[in-house]
Image (tube, grey):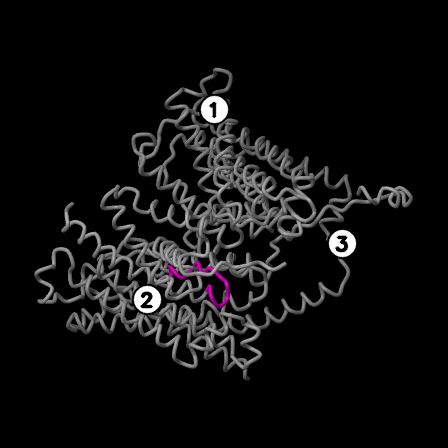
Amino acid sequence: MDWQYLAELFLGGLTRGSIYALIAIGYTMVYGIIELINFAHGEIYMLGAFTGLIVASVLGILGFPPAQILILAALAAIIYCAGYGYTMEKIAYKPLRGAGRLSPLISAIGMSLFLQNYIILAQTSDFLPFPSLIPEFAFLDPVAHIFGSSNFVIVLTSSVSMAALTVFIKYTKMGKAMRATAQNRKMAMLLGVNADKIISITFLLGSSLAALGGVLIASHVGMVNFAVGFLAGIKAFTAAVLGGIGSIPGAMLGGLFLGLSESFATGYISSDYEDVFAFTLLVVFLIFRPSGIMGKAKVEKV
Amino acid sequence: MHALKKSLLISLWFMFLTFPIMVIRVNTIEHTVIWRWNNLILIGIGSFVLSLIWPWALRRREASRAKDSTAQAQVHILDRLAANKNILRTVIVALLALFLAIPLLGTTYQTNILISFLLYVILGLGLNIIVGVAGLLFLGHAAFYAIGAYSYALLSQYFGLGFWLALPLGGLIAALAGLALAFPVLRLRGDYLAIVTLGFGEIVRLVLENWSSLTGGPSGVSNIPRPGLMGMQLDVAQANIYVYYIVLVMAMITIVAVARVKDSRIGRALQALREDEIACQAMGIDRVGVKLMAFSLGTAWAGFAGVIFAAKTTFINPASFTFFESAIILSIVVLGGMGSNLGVILGAAFLVLLPEYMRAFSEYRMILFATAMVLMMVFRPQGLIPARGRIYHVDDPDAHSSNGGQA
């Protein structure tokens, strides 16, 4: 048993998993409230990475220090992606409320293709290098070969934002209204919850987290292109399903589970089939335990 | 006045939203920035106009819905045309003559475009059985297209099988693969089914890409033989025309077969499944059997199309069978009208022929598809030509009442 290799895989999986969890939260929140798989969520993450890259490059040319650039770029990405998420919901999903389940899903696929091609046309279809903005921390030096500072920042930022989200959902009035809407939208509306507003806020929150994930992973990996959102989106969706779709702690757990198992599978089995592994896990889970780790089985009433 | 103010705000919002992506373009190597301010003006004007039209279009949609529910089902103009056998026959004969004559009159380029159009007709009609008729959202159609293409490529590479043997085999293998996918997903429906089929499609593509010893990996299989015509050696242009006729015949078979399936007992069971799964089971329809049937019937056509595609291009690689391909086939079905065969053919014509003949817009092809998909779902979810059930006429009122129980 090679312990160092094991630790390396574990920490790599942790980094990956926290990003999946950040994106998966957006899926799970939207699904919880309007029962829609927001296919375009992965594209929001990609837009976050692109906005971050553009802002970071402009600031870099203006001569800002890297740490400030990182924070400003992440903020810009969050603000813009929240805007994109909000607008997307108003255009493509809101007019379709109450129109069955197939129409919004196809509309979401259309939105996802739209955003990909928007980037191709307005920016480029090539891979762009992303500047490495995360500073090296001296206290991580002894373990830097297995757990670099970018891994540290990713795990830390995502844990903090997930904790903040949990507090928001659990202890604020808005969070309570969100939970009520997820449980029963009509009843919540009767009790004076503005469901449209709650849905908008859900999209804002989910998109901001995805944007944060986009900037973090792009500066960790060092590359972005228009297609990164598709794979990341599907994997994050897998994470959401693993944890039980609709459940926020489930999405976090599912993200970590997927990240770790993917990391171990590529480390010990084969790296060629890295993506096949995630898809297989998704298929197997949907077939045998569609309610996921934390979800409750749904009983259908006729 | 109020509407104008609102539109102004919306256009400002869009100008803000699209600012970093549309206006700024950074050159990451030379570290220079290009500012494209004219894009900002375009976005502003465009979103201003669109935001004025948008609420009006939504109101119109509501109005037409209200009208639909009150007015009795009116006879559609197409129905009236189709009811007249003479007109119908003339149109079909004219179209057929046109399609038969095109390779003799047109260039190789024209023939190539029409081959791909007819391939998409076959693919779209196959998917239409699953998505349109049975209502199972299926996002992995390209995988079965790939399975068909690779069956022919690999069978001819390893066993020297000819095209005519590979064509039915490719369809069969794709149908079996469809069954293999259908078994585990029987319990899933709606969006979960969509995701699993998408995952399956990606798995197939990734396996084709990584199993290099068998499939040649990302570089694919080349030198796939073209179909032979009774031992004659054809040059490239002739072979192309030959493939065109094969695909034309295949498309006609598909159109007839799919139309027959739709009106058959199976087809009606599939439509019942689409409308309500539980009620359909309560009516004594074998849900499992019907679902398996839908999958294998749909994917078989993708297999046939795949074999023809491989024979036409003589070179295939996994990059031809991405999720994009599945999305295009899906949008053909959605734009044309789910469940409507004529709609699917028209959808294929729109999505394949229009971009080919309007080269100037080829860059914008995908973004226009995507926009059309969203707008179609918002304003006309039933598609260009909505599916309509077959109308059965009973001439003798007595026969009707006595046979009522069996009808």
**Which residue is more in the foreground, B155 or B75?**
B155
Closer to the camera, A206 or B95?
Answer: A206
Label 3 sits on residue: B75
Q: In this rendered view, identify the residue nearer to me: A249 or B311.
A: A249
Q: Residue B163, which numbered label?
A: 1
Residue A143 is situated, as x and y percent measured from the top left of the image, at 11, 59
C-alpha separation, residue under disc 1 versus residue under disc 2: 50 Å
Task: Tell me which numbered mark, 3 or 1, is placed earlier along the sequence.
Answer: 3
Q: Pointer 1: residues within 10 angstroms few (<14), some, or many (20+)?
A: many
Chain letter belonging to callout 3: B
- The Cα atoms of the two marked residues, 3 and 1, are separated by 45 Å
Q: CB of mark 2 within 8 Å of CB of mark 3?
A: no
In which quarter of the view is residue A142 placed? bottom left
Callout 2, which amino acid? Answer: Ala
Amino acid type of the residue tagged 1 in the rendering: Phe
Q: Position of residue A182 (x, y in %)?
A: 49, 70
Q: Quadrant of the C terminus of chain B?
A: top right
A19 relative position to B117: left or right: left
In magenta stretch: residue A125:
no
Q: Please report the bounds of the magenta region as a residue range.
A: A31-43
User: From the viewer's perspective, is B299 left or right of B31?
Assistant: right
Chain at numbered mark 1: B
Q: Which residue is mark 2?
A: A211
Label 1: element kind:
helix
Q: Is residue B145 left or right of B38 when viewed as pictured? A: right
Would you call the spot at circle 2 few (<14 residues within 10 Å), some (14-19), or many (20 or more)?
A: many
Both labels 1 and 2 in a single chain? no
**Does residue A117 appear anywhere in the picture?**
no
Residue A263, compared with residue A71, is above or below; it is: above
| For residue A59, above or below residue B184 | below
Quarter assignment of residue B14: bottom left
